[in-house]
Structures are given as C-alpha cells and as structure tokens.
Image (cartoon, rainbow, N blue to C red):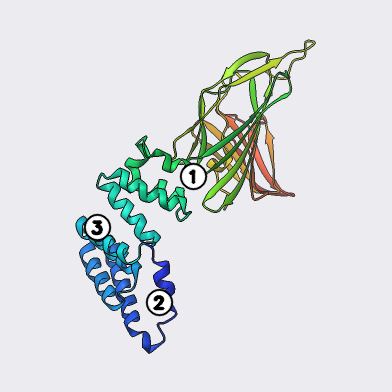
Amino acid sequence: MRAGAAALLAGLALCCADPAYAPRRRALEAYDEGRAALEAGDAAAARLAFSRARGHDPGSPVLLLWEARAADAAGDVRAAEALVTEGLHRWPDHTELRWTHAALLARGGRAAEAAAVLRALLAQGLVDPLDLSADADFAALRVDPATAGLFAAAAPQVDLVAEEGAVLVGDPWELELRVVGPAGPVALRGTPPPPGLELERVVEELLVDGRRVRRVLRFAWRAVAPMDAPWGPVAVHVGDAAPVPLPVLPVLVRAVGGRVAAGAPVAAPDLPPVPSSLAGPEGVVAGARRIGAFALVIAPPGARIELDGAPPGAELELRVAGQTAWVGRWWSGRPGGRFRVLQGEAVLAEGPLP
C-alpha cells in the first residue's frame, strides 16, 4: 500500500510563514513525527502522530492515507480499511485512495473487486502499469489468469529484426532487438547460437523515456562455416519481469566458390552480452576485469584499446541518448596476452588480460 507526500508538502510549505496557518504548521510537524516513527519501525507511534496531524488539518486526504498506512503497518487492517472507506466517501476521485482501496481488497482475497478498481484507474490514465506491476500487494493478481491482463502493459515489449535468407561464409550475420521495458539489467538466456558464428560486435543504445527504458541492441556475428541450423529457444530477460521468448531463428550460411573465412570456426559459441548489464553509463574506469567465465576490457569514450598477443575479441559499445558512454572488448574464457587503453598518447590502463 502506498501513500504520497508531495501534495501534502506542496500545500503546507508555502503557508508555514503565515501565522494564520498555525494549524497546518502543527499538522506538518506531526506528519514529520509520523514519518520518522515509521522509518524507525514504530508503527503505533506513527499512527498516533498522523492522527494528531489530521486533527490539525482534517481536510487533507494525504494525512488520512498516512494514518491508514500506519494502522496497516501496526497490523490493524480493519482500521486501515475504515480510514480508506471514510476517505473515499469524502474524496471519491482521489487516485491514491482508490489505489490503496484496491491494495487492501487484493490482500483480503477480493481479487475481482480490486481488479475493478484498478481497471478504472488504468482506463482514466491515472496510474502507470509499471507501478502496479511493482506493488507487492497485487502479486496474486499478477499470476491469476483472470486479472493478469491488468499488468500486460508493464511487461517488456520486444521487437526483433533477424537476418533473412542465406549469408556467405565470411559475411556478417546480424540480429537487432528493440526492447521497451522497466529499468533493470537485460540479458539473453537460453540456447547459444549454432557453431560457426563468431561474435564480432554488440552495440546497445539506451534512451530513458519516462518510467520506461528503450533499448536497441545490435548484434553482429561473422559466419565462419556453412550451416543450416535453427537457433533457439532464447528469451530476453529484463529485471524481474517475466522473460520474453524469441522465435526460433533459422541460421543459413552458404559457401560459394570455395570461399572460406580466415581462422577456425568457434566450437562452442556463447550467448552475447548486453553492454549495460556489464557496466553502467556512469563512472567508467578504464581497465580489464573478469566476469564469470568471460574477460572484459573497458574504455571511456574517445579512448582506444590495443592488444598484444591476444585475439581481437568482440567489440562492445554502450550509447546513451545517442552519445557513446564506453567501448570495450569481450572474450569467452581466458584470452591471454596484454592490453592497453589509450586516450591520445596517454596510457589510461595496461596489463595482462585476466
């Protein structure tokens, strides 16, 4: 159950200097006491403080909500329900009251009634499906087939553009994923691509759009052996949301006129990494690190990575709102050799590959 303070503070902060608003100043003081008590885990003291605040400002639905929240935290669910019912009689269109009413109904096993309240809020555009999906009070509704549709808009949306038809040995085989969903780490999980594809490059573009994150992931492999093989199953995982399965992808590579690629085919490819899940856009420190069974060298924008005695690895790049946040190289296993990260002529980092 949630309760907001922004409306309360906006209404009170402007009046504190005016003696005519002494009751509201006292309400704000009691509200602060209640919040402090809640944070300290003393729900009973918080409930008394919020009740006292309401006595000074009985026209505030937000103070009523905080008293209900404290009553709920103290284990008195009936009192919380009574307060919310009182509030709805006085302010029937109040979004937070309606949300809290739905949460209490859902926790009380009255799923159909809770869903009706939530449908109305969603239809009016008053709540974000991402908030509904994140609220633990609605956990049972998310898994109930009768009400799971309420949360569909919060699920990650994935569009796929895959290579069509055959490519020639030595040419790139490319895949693009457009992912819109909540903030959180993104990963591909499932069956690795078939042998004969060697990962060369991963570029991720991020754009924060309100509560959602829009990602475009572009993967490029080099086809190093002829094949006609399916790739799948594979799913896109975004934070704690349910995984989004991808269709099984046909991988068709042809050798023409004896054309072969330089180098040996990869015996056991891995699923490609997602750059933002390796390092965020802020505070990138040049250097090398191990991440499980993989090695990563990372460099800030404008820097370059030089290798000595090591295979080239896959190139990685993270872009945020059109600007490069960092670049890197990625290997499966232990590549050996050494690396240097240079910015102009300055050496930012160097050493053995981990």
Contact check, label 2 and label 1, Cβ < 8 Å: no
Q: Residue at position x 25%, y 44% from top?
A: 109
Q: Say the numbered circle drawn on residue 184.
A: 1
Q: Nearer the viewer, mark 2 or mark 1?
A: 2
- Residue marked by disc 3: 81
Q: Position of residue 49 (x, y in %)?
A: 25, 71
Q: Say the numbered circle drawn on residue 12.
A: 2
Q: Position of residue 143 (x, y in %)?
A: 36, 37
**Image-based side of 234 in relation to 328, left or right:** left
Badge 3 marks a residue whose secondary structure is helix
Q: Nearer the viewer, mark 3 or mark 2?
A: 3
Q: Quadrant of the C terminus?
A: top right
Badge 2 marks a residue whose secondary structure is helix
Packing grade of label 1 (10 A; few <14, some 14-19, many >=20) is some
Q: Residue at position x 32%, y 82% from top?
A: 23
Nearer to the camera, 112 or 243 = 112
**Image-based side of 164 in relation to 187, left or right:** right
Q: Amino acid at mark 2?
A: Leu
